[in-house]
Amino acid sequence: MSNELVQAIILGLLQGITEFFPISSTAHLILMPWLFGWSGQVDTLTFNVAVHGGTLLALLVCFYRDWMDMLSHDRKMLFTIFAAIIPAGVAGILFHDVIEHTLRHPLIIAASLVIFGALMLVAERTGKQAKRNVTFLNAMIIGCAQAIALIPGTSRSGITITAGLFSNLKRETAARFSFLLSTPIIAGATLLECKKIYKTPGDYQLDLFAAGFIAAFISGIFAIKFLMAYLKKYPLNAFAYYRFVLAGGILMLYFIRI
């Protein structure tokens, strides 16, 4: 097995866990190659999106009953979800180049980890966690928060669950809606990158992409089931503290290396 294939599998496993844990999957996928000096296709946005495809499949497997119910009965919630993804979709299109070439910097990632980790702690302390139903206003607030997650280090699940807590949703309700909301966004980004790969397949090592995809799918299933059970009993505090430690480690390594 080649070194690049091992790297792809490691990054896929990491993606599946960190996509759903509120600790930023993008940050980890950028930092691992930077930390260990990995280069090539595993250190590109296209590979990043390919392994997101694995977590997309994990979402569909874990929440297919929710989607079937919305498609057949709860059309109002289906409309709400697609309305709430508009902010992130527009931001992704407008700022794609900035995200790919400018924001993937260790200092930006460290700052995002700290800032949004602190917001998690504030949300846990101030949110009433009284509501089990997501209103249209709640959904739009969470949707706007999802657009911020395009900044590496933010965490899509972290910022959307945090926004849900600020909206006084119960923790597990916020997490479920966060995962449902992320599904169309991840699907759209994956399809765009697949189109790019389809046009020039010779430019990509498809075996690396497939290995990362499968690894992300397997670890993603585990992460979703674990987190949904965890959030019924425990707050986000442990994840916030992990983000602080990770940010400290990034800053230390960054200033040692320069």
Image (tube, rainbow, N blue to C red):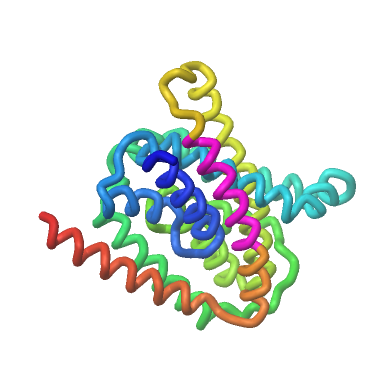
Whether residue 95 appears in this view of the structure is: no
Q: Residue at x 34, y 53 (%)?
A: 32
The foreground one among 190 and 132 is 190
Q: Is residue 21 magenta?
A: no
Furthest residue in direction left, as rendered = 258
Q: Which contiguous range is marked in magenta?
A: 208-224
Q: Number of marks in the image? A: 0
The foreground one among 94 and 10 is 10
Q: Give the left or right position of residue 242, taking residue 53 as reference.
A: left
Q: Is residue 128 above or below residue 147?
A: below
Q: Give the left or right position of residue 41, taking residue 149 as reference.
A: left
The foreground one among 29 and 88 is 29
Q: Give the left or right position of residue 106, taking residue 228 as reference.
A: left
Q: Is residue 221 magenta?
A: yes
Q: Residue at x 71, y 49 (%)?
A: 80
Residue 153 is situated, as x and y percent measured from the top left of the image, at: 38, 57
Q: Is residue 48 above or below residue 135?
A: above
Q: Give the left or right position of residue 103, taking residue 29 as reference.
A: left
Furthest residue in direction right, as rendered = 73
Residue 114 is situated, as x and y percent measured from the top left of the image, at: 34, 68
Q: Give the main secondary structure of the magenta stretch.
A: helix
The foreground one among 237 and 218 is 218
Residue 170 is situated, as x and y percent measured from the top left of the image, at: 66, 74
Tell me the quarter of the picture where residue 3 sits.
top left
Q: Residue at x 56, y 79 (%)?
A: 235
Q: Quadrant of the C terminus?
A: bottom left
Residue 209 is situated, as x and y percent measured from the top left of the image, at: 50, 36
Tell me the quarter of the picture where residue 225 sits.
bottom right
Q: Is residue 76 above or below residue 112?
A: above
Whether residue 109 appears in this view of the structure is: yes
Q: Residue at x 59, y 36 (%)?
A: 188
Q: Quadrant of the N terminus?
A: top left
